[in-house]
Amino acid sequence: MIVIGGGPGGYAAALYGAGIGLDIGLVERGAIGGTCLNVGCIPAKELLETAHVFRTVRDAAQFGVNSSPPQVDWSVTMTRKQAIIDQLVGGLTSLLKNRKVTLYDGSGSLGADHQVRVQGGESGDVTLTAPAIILATGSLPRTIPGFELDGVFVATSDEVLSLEKLPATAAVIGGGAIGCEFASMMGDLGVDVTVLEALPQILVGCDADAAKVVERSFKKRGITVRTGVMVQGHTPDASGRFTSVAFGDGESIDVEKVVVSVGRRPFADLLGLDGTGARVDERGFVEIDERGRTGEPGVWAVGDLVNTPQLAHVAFAEGMLAIRDILGEDPTPLDHDGTPWCIYCNPEVAFAGHTEESAKAAGFDVVTSSHRFIGNGRAKIVGDTDGIVKVIAERRADGTGGRILGVHMVGPWVTEQLGQGYLAVNWQATVDEVAAFIQPHPTMSELFGETVLSLTGRSLHG
Ligand code: NAI
């Protein structure tokens, strides 16, 4: 088998397949680990953790732990971030080698008859062929007209993760997952941040109540959030120190950095595909069926290259699904409606399943319950009480909850608490079934149990 692309989709397919005994060649033009390890999930979360440590030290006096006001030594921050990336990339490379995956350095493109041409890297110009091929070339940050990358003012996630120093002021265009994570990180580290979002709410796709908690928290911490505004362009001032970003109805803001986080586009540009039945749609995604098969027999596509949620863990799952299909195991397709989502801004957001709005739109008669972390012992101990857990269930005739349709969390460490909510939604559990389980005390995850319990019509604290 040949895998083109060594990010989460490609390396998961390679590791999983090689573990089962397939003979695999993996073609990668950049660093193994792809966007996730090198310029995505891992460095972004590492910088958010720096912001968390900064807040902890800044607010330590409330615990009777006195220290001088914290200062950020950004070069140390960057060194630590890079060390974590290097360790993970090194570990992954060893894992692949231990499983006898052959690594090819270069760009891979697919032609007729399963011919994969590798060029432009240390492996030289070689042509490979195999009965099964997985395309996993990922995505790139999208840019918008008027905000072309200039190496000075305009940055995408690729550049922000390697800034030489933090700016004093920044405009973040797009209030999605990336925009909110960067706004949160920079805001907590003292950057004066303004988020400019075209739609009426930030974090579209999240339950509106959860998005509101994030927006309120941002505002409380001095991060300006402007929703429903379009950006027009930017004009650097004569000194070259600022640029003026024009937005909305004649408004503008002067900033040292503009972060463009308006989504990512699939990267099929170098894949070729001439003479194959694989098709790229008008938005650039490689078209697949529910098992990841492209239009070319024996060729699959996974990860950000296909039109499914652009998440590393979805890519892992798609990589493994493709392998199972290659092995003829007739695997069950993934249910993307139940995908777990985790956004690591402060406060964190995590959810799986329907929002209240989408459940109603899908025709469900719903009942919901929300509980706030302010009443949770562990959250109080930690000193981080902003947030809620909201559970959406099918309404039974007596008004209590039946099947759990969605679990939405915003608050401290919720990305680590989603697990049981994710299982409840995807196992199609009912409120009664989940309420019967014991929640460990004192934990923040008790709040999920409490919220589900209250949907039985009875409750403890809430
Ligand atoms: P996104 O699609 O999540 O959000 C982009 C936002 O930009 C949207 O709210 C959109 O309305 C807004 N926008 C688009 N054009 C605009 C304009 N001209 N002016 C103002 N606003 C505009 O994309 P994002 O945040 O760049 O993330 C890309 C992908 O990476 C997403 O699919 C996301 O799922 C994934 N990701 C996930 C993370 C996580 O789960 N923790 C973290 C980072 C990325």
Image (cartoon, grey):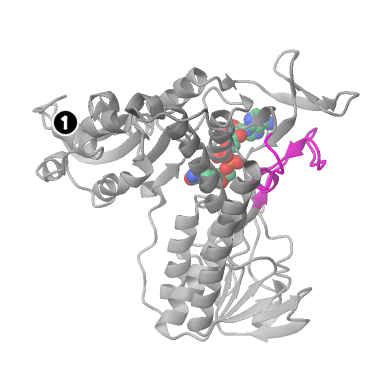
Q: Position of residue 141 (x, y in %)?
A: 67, 47
Q: Position of residue 305 (x, y in %)?
A: 60, 58
Q: Going by the image, does 208 lie left or right of 142?
A: left
Q: Which residue is mark 1?
A: 455
| Residue type (three-letter) at the residue carrying disc 1 | Leu
8 relative to 229, above or below: below
Which region shows up in magenta?
A: 140-166
**Which quarter shows the N terminus?**
bottom right
Q: Residue at 70%, 17% (x, y): give it.
A: 248
Along the viewing direction, whichever of 294 and 192 lies nearer the viewer: 192
Q: Position of residue 49 (x, y in %)?
A: 48, 43
Q: Position of residue 291 (x, y in %)?
A: 45, 65
Q: Residue at 70%, 73% (x, y): give it.
A: 108
**Which quarter shows the C terminus?**
top left
Indicate yes or no: mark 1 CB to ligand 1 under 8 Å: no
Question: Does the magenta-highlighted stretch encompass residue 154?
Answer: yes
